Image: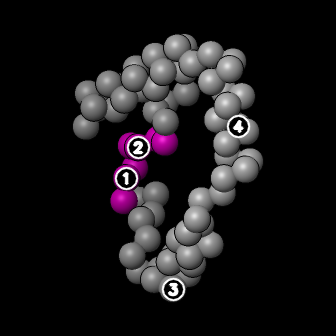
Amino acid sequence: MSALRDRVTELVARQREQQTDADRQALQLAYLHQPEPFEAEFSQVACDHPDKCAHDCDYPDWTPGGAR
């Protein structure tokens, strides 16, 4: 699992390095004007089915986006 985490961390770093200011601005603008169509429904799933949610103890060595 450690090797996979390292590879994902390297990939995220490369993608961030290659991203231009224009790319960042375009993504930010898109997110402002195009909310996720099922965001409210998706967020309700955790409330309706708490037994299906993952917890920190399920993935103790995992960090979203890799280690910082």
Identify the mark nearer the N-term, 4 or 3.
Answer: 4
Residue at left offset 66%, top offset 27%:
24
- Report which residue position mark 4 lands on: 28
What residue span does the magenta drawing correspond to? 58-64
Residue 52 percent across, percent down from the top left = 39, 76
Q: CA distance from mark 4 to mark 2?
A: 26 Å
Residue at left offset 66%, top offset 57%:
35
Q: Are circles 1 and 2 on residues that touch, CB within 8 Å? A: yes
Q: Residues within 10 Å of mark 4 (few under 14, many from 20)?
A: few
- Report which residue position mark 2 lands on: 62
Residue 36 percent across, percent down from the top left = 59, 59
Q: CA distance from mark 3 to mark 1?
A: 22 Å
User: Does residue 63 show up?
Assistant: yes
As drawn, 36 above or below 28: below
As drawn, 39 above or below 67: below
> Does dot 2 land on a helix, a strand or a loop?
loop
Asked which quadrant contains residue 51, the reply is bottom left
As drawn, 51 above or below 29: below
Badge 2 amino acid = Trp
Badge 4 amino acid = Gln
Nearer to us of marks 3 and 2 is 3
Q: Residues within 10 Å of mark 1 (few under 14, many from 20)?
A: few
- Report which residue position mark 1 lands on: 59
Nearer to us of marks 4 and 2 is 4
Asked if residue 60 is among those painted magenta in the image, a careful observer would answer: yes
